[in-house]
Image (cartoon, grey):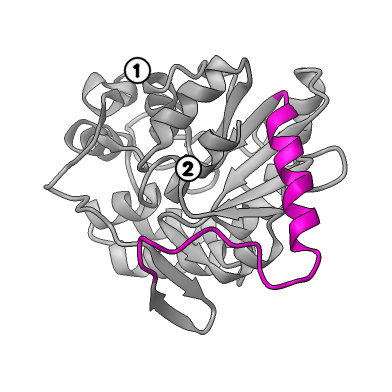
Amino acid sequence: MSSSISSSSCCCCYSACVKTDSRRFAPQKQRTRSSGGSTKATPAEESTMGGSSSSSSKKARALEIWRMCDAVCFDVDSTVIDHEGIDALAAYLGKGEEVAKVTTQAMNGEIPFEKALFYRLNAMQCSRQQMDAYLKEYPVKLSNGFQELRDKLKEKGKTVYLVSGGFRQMIHPIAECLDIPVPTNVWANNLLYLEDGSMNSEKPFDDENEFTWRAGGKALAVAHVKKTGNFKTVVMVGDGATDVEARAENGADIVIGYGGTVRRENVEKTADWFVMDFKELVEAL
């Protein structure tokens, strides 16, 4: 028999949002990544829409939808928080380098997300006990400015969801500290364990009741949010290729790319609006 989220995985230590954690997450510089390599980006870089002549009208439309939207769906890793949670967990388990490489490939759209997810889970073989220990030891660090954005959206009466390819065991505590209803306003992958707490290798996560384990899954999740919430307009915000996929029929009306943690060239080119700082979104509301 398999079990999923344990009560201990939502411990107070992890659910308390903190600004710094010198043990593991040092302040990060903004990074630019593309399939061809990496370059540094200075904090002073401004948001960009690319060099196309239609960028002004494209941004104007995005601004209008951002202001009038009913709900906003946020990616979590490298968006709501300032790191990739699965990579941090992998490092804790001694599999950091191997897993981080696959994460980068998946976020750049170089390999199918479901393939990357299976590979990383098999590499880590994370037990329930190891997950609980990690969550207790390492608190969450929100991305700079996200709490202010969350507060502004709440003030404006916009419903917020977290839509992540990560794990509910790690996402739920983040949602709770942001006053986002759990589990109703969270879509992520629920890890399944055997009775002794070891990973269920045959069925490591719930692929029947969740959306985001596969390519295109965020589009399905957003479409579900839109339909069940009876929302007219929904925006997706995130840093990766899987977030851009959410802009699909019946899915997100626009995608806002975020490059404050990792600046991905493909996202910058394909998002409806690309920002480097959440302050720009706060000021636009």
- The reply, left or right, for residue 210 in relation to residue 253 is left
Q: CA distance from mark 1 to mark 2?
A: 32 Å
Q: Secondary structure at mark 1?
A: helix
Tell me the number on the disc at residue 7: 1
Q: Residue at x 59, y 62 (%)?
A: 48
Name the amino acid type tagged 2. Answer: Phe
Left-right relation of 47 to 41: right
Looking at the picture, which amino acid does disc 1 mark? Ser
Contact between labelled residues 2 and 1, with CB atoms less than 8 Å apart:
no
* Residue 68 appears left or right of 150: right
Of 222 and 41, the residue lying toward us:
41
42 or 246: nearer the viewer: 42
Q: Height in image: 182 above or below 262?
A: above
- Left or right of 239 in this view: 139: left
Depth order, front residue of 153/142: 153
One can see residue 204 in this view? no
From the viewer's perspective, is residue 208 above or below residue 36? above
Q: Which residues are magenta?
A: 41-70
In this rendering, does residue 91 appear at all?
A: yes
Q: Name the residue at 74% across, 28% down.
A: 68
The answer to whether residue 195 is magenta is: no
- Residue 66 drawn at (x, y percent): 69, 36
The residue drawn where x is 39% and y is 38% is 145
Q: Residue 125 at what x, y percent from top left? A: 36, 51
> Residue lying farthest right?
249
Residue that mark 2 sits on: 278
For residue 130, which quarter of the picture?
Answer: top left
Dot placed on the residue nearer the N-terminal end, 1 or 2: 1
**Taking 94 as reference, is 255 above or below it?**
above
228 versus 208 height, above or below: above
Crowding at dot 1, Cα within 10 Å, few <14 / some 14-19 / many 20+, comes out as few
